Each structure stands twice: as structure tokens, then as C-alpha cells.
């Protein structure tokens, strides 16, 4: 008797020819980045343009102090001055009190221990003062004493357009920070906020009549 034929070994399936994949068959997908990795690939939106504040009209009044407390029994009050020109109080004829700027004729003014004692028409008792404690004391701009050459009231500086020595615009002066040593000018321009110390090496020219300032920012030095 002859031996039975050996069993055939299984043959691998024929290779799929290129392009033979059925339409609609699933394709391998690349995993999507998650969390911080995904955010790194998102383009950042451009920063919004910096808005340069508009100029405001010159003020008609200046704050020169605040009512601190009554002085005596006849309606006089102590005022804390917030001006570096206290000598201008001696010539005052009228002050304006509070945000409503109540006009009051000045009867007398005298300095006392860093404060100023003021008597005005219409105040006859300490109660008149107590009702107005903390109120600002204003004077008319036209009553402000002229400053020496090279010195300016803040209202004369705020709103000036600031340029570098080459005539390139830096921005507009919008605020003044008072420090123990020197003032610091806050300038808002196309590049954002710029702080300029009010020292001769930085501030080269001030021309309030022409509404301009020339400055060399500290990083230029």
C-alpha cells in the first residue's frame, strides 16, 4: 500500500496590488496633539493697536490744597497744600471749594507748621468747615503765579506730543508720576507705555506753546 500524500502547507494570501484598496476603507490617522502641544501650533492673534489719548482742553482751575480741619471758632480752616508754590496763597482773593467749586472771597491766609490757615467769607463756625472737610481747594488758572523759566505746571505738560532727537514720534504725554527724586512722564505711543524720568539727560526740550517735547529715552543713552 502506498503512503498517503503529505498535507499541503498553507500559502500566504496574495499581496494586494497597488490601488486595490476598496473605496471608503479606513485609513490610518495621525493622532491629534492635545493640551499644550495643540496650543503651541495655534498662531497668536496680533495685539490690538494702542489708542493714543486725545488732548483735553487746558483747565480753568487748579487744585492747590484740601480742607483738613477747623481752626478756632470763627470759621477759619487748616488747608494741606498740594503745591510746591505756597507763596501764591498770599495774593489770593478768591478760592473755589469742592467739586462744585463754590466761590468764596478770601479774608486772610497765613502759613502754619506746613499747613495754611485760611479764612473765607461765608464761614462763621467750625461746623461750616466740618461739613466740607476733605474738599479740594481750587484757584483760577489766571490767579496762578508765573513760574520761573524751565518750570511748568502739570497741565502745561499733559497732552504734549513727544519726539526723539531724530524727530520720530514716541507718543503723547498722558500723566505725571511724582516721586521723591524727580517726576516721571508717562507717554503712550504706538509701542505702548513709555516712562521718561524728568531729568536733563532725558528731556531735552519742552515747548508748551507748540505742544511738543523732545526726549531721549533711557534706552537711547
Image: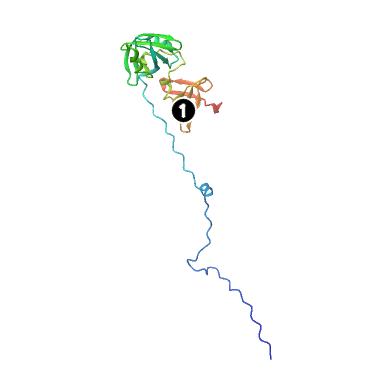
Q: Position of residue 138 (x, y in %)?
A: 37, 17
Could you say whether the residue bearing mark 1 is in a helix, strand or loop?
Answer: strand
Q: Nearer the viewer, residue 100 or 143?
A: 100
Say which quadrant the C terminus sits in. Answer: top right
Foreground pick, 123 / 218: 123
Q: Is residue 55 above or below residue 1?
A: above
Farthest bottom residue?
1
In the rendered structure, the answer to whether residue 195 lies left or right of residue 60 reads right
Q: Position of residue 46 (x, y in %)?
A: 46, 41
Colouring convention used in this rendered image of the protein: rainbow
Q: Which residue is mark 1?
A: 187
In terms of image quadrants, where is residue 7?
Answer: bottom right
Quarter of the figure with the N terminus: bottom right
The location of residue 150, given as percent across then percent down, is 47, 16
| 62 left or right, relative to 28 | left
Query: In this figure, what is the number of numbered marks?
Result: 1
Q: Is residue 1 above or below residue 160?
A: below
Residue positioned most to the left: 122
Label 1: how many residues lie within 10 Å, few (<14), some (14-19) or many (20+)?
many
| Percent of width and height locating residue 173 | 44, 26
The relative height of residue 94 versus residue 2 in the rendered view (above or below) is above
User: Which residue is nearer to you in this view: 204 or 79?
Assistant: 79
Amino acid at each position: 500500500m502506498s503512503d498517503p500524500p503529505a498535507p499541503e502547507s498553507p500559502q500566504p494570501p496574495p499581496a494586494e496590488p497597488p490601488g486595490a484598496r476598496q473605496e471608503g476603507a479606513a485609513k490610518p490617522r495621525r493622532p491629534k496633539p492635545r493640551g499644550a502641544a495643540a496650543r503651541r501650533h495655534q498662531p497668536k492673534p496680533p495685539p490690538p493697536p494702542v489708542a493714543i489719548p486725545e488732548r483735553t482742553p487746558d483747565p480753568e482751575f487748579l487744585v492747590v490744597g484740601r480742607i483738613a480741619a477747623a481752626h478756632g471758632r470763627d470759621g477759619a480752616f487748616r488747608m494741606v497744600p498740594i503745591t510746591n508754590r505756597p507763596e501764591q496763597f498770599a495774593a489770593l482773593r478768591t478760592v473755589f471749594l469742592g467739586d462744585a467749586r463754590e466761590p468764596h472771597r478770601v479774608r486772610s491766609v497765613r502759613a502754619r507748621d506746613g499747613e495754611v490757615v485760611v479764612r473765607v467769607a461765608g464761614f462763621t463756625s467750625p461746623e461750616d468747615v466740618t461739613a466740607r472737610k476733605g474738599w479740594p481747594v481750587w484757584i483760577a488758572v489766571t490767579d496762578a503765579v508765573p513760574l520761573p523759566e524751565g518750570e511748568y505746571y502739570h497741565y502745561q505738560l499733559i497732552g504734549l506730543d513727544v519726539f526723539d532727537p531724530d524727530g520720530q514720534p514716541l507718543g503723547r504725554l498722558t500723566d505725571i508720576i511724582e516721586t521723591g527724586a524727580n517726576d516721571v512722564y508717562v507717554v503712550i505711543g504706538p509701542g505702548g507705555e513709555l516712562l521718561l524720568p524728568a531729568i536733563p539727560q532725558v528731556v531735552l526740550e519742552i515747548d508748551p506753546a507748540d505742544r511738543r517735547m523732545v526726549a531721549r529715552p533711557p534706552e537711547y543713552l
